Image (cartoon, grey):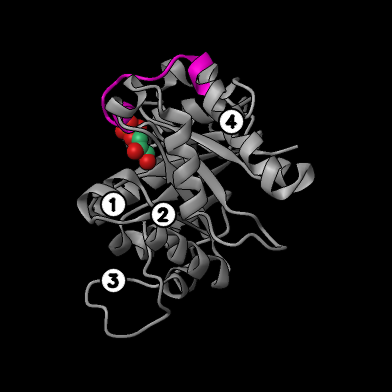
Amino acid sequence: MRRKLIAGNWKMNGLRASAASLIQELLDGISGAEPSFELLACELLVCPPACLLETVGGLTAGTPVELGGQDCHCAEAGAHTGDISAVMLKDAGCAYVILGHSERRSDHGESDALVRAKAGAALAAGLTPIVCVGETAAERDDGRTLAVVETQLAGSLPELGPGRPPIIAYEPVWAIGSGRTPSTSEVGEVHGGVRRWLEARLGAEAAAAVRILYGGSMKPGNAAELLAVPDVDGGLIGGASLKAEDFLAIARACG
Ligand code: 13P
């Protein structure tokens, strides 16, 4: 059975003080202040901006809340001003890194090939990459959603070997930050399509081990129905991960 993962992508939000209070509220929420919280029906992950990793990691170390980065470079070290390597993220306490988010693909022109190189570096450093894919509104309107997603998967996923498999996040670009989501049957079609794509390449057993997250305007009000869709193995949450109450409500919806 795949354990659901509820991952918060804080994007470019937070300062040390607000990050510390958000984490404190999350920890209070899962530590007996609410005994009914069925934690650990899901795994919880926060991905703060790089400069907050130390603050957040200091508070989450030894707790069930895991730490992740939002991007990494494909080289281990060297002359890459402004970049951070997978090895550095690992050293800072991260277990995961988000890669190929549509905001990186559009703001920084990241290609599938670059995302694949980053994902390979992440695996080599002992991080689990969360590789993001998803169609634009125009691509969906053209009926090309699955084709676009499959092309991104083929180009962005690293060589899969033994060990912890990467995670895939399906994030329709038009659903991000818009308050709009695909219907549950549309989400099911894409997640089912991704699973079949994986099965054809990896075989049933290895494909069954890959978690496929949904991201894009997931909120407390729609989380339960989205998380109940077959092959939805968790959520990648933007805006709602910045409020402890909302993030915890989404995590509870896994139960
Ligand atoms: P929102 O939840 O704010 O729509 O963002 C989703 C996202 O991009 C997560 O990576």
Mark 2 and mark 1: Cα distance apart in space: 8 Å
Q: In this rendering, would 200 be left or right of 32? A: right
Q: Which residue is mark 4?
A: 193
Please report whichever mark, 1 or 4, sits nearer to the chain's N-terminal start.
1
Please report whichever mark, 2 or 4, sits nearer to the chain's N-terminal start.
2
Secondary structure state at the residue bearing disc 2: strand
Please report whichever mark, 4 or 3, sits nearer to the chain's N-terminal start.
3
Image quadrant of ligand 1 equals top left
* Circles 2 and 1: CB atoms closer than 8 Å: yes
Q: Residues within 10 Å of mark 1 (few under 14, many from 20)?
A: some
Q: In this rendering, would 25 be left or right of 90? A: left
Q: Which residue is mark 1?
A: 104
Mark 3 and mark 2: Cα distance apart in space: 14 Å
Numbered disc in front, either 1 or 4: 4
Q: Residues within 10 Å of mark 2 (few under 14, many from 20)?
A: many
Res. 92 mark: none
Span highlighted in magenta in the image: 173-187
Q: Nearer the viewer, residue 241 or 194?
A: 194
Res. 83 mark: 3
Q: Is residue 100 visible?
A: yes
Q: In this rendering, would 156 be left or right of 109? A: right
Residue 7: image x %, image y %?
47, 42
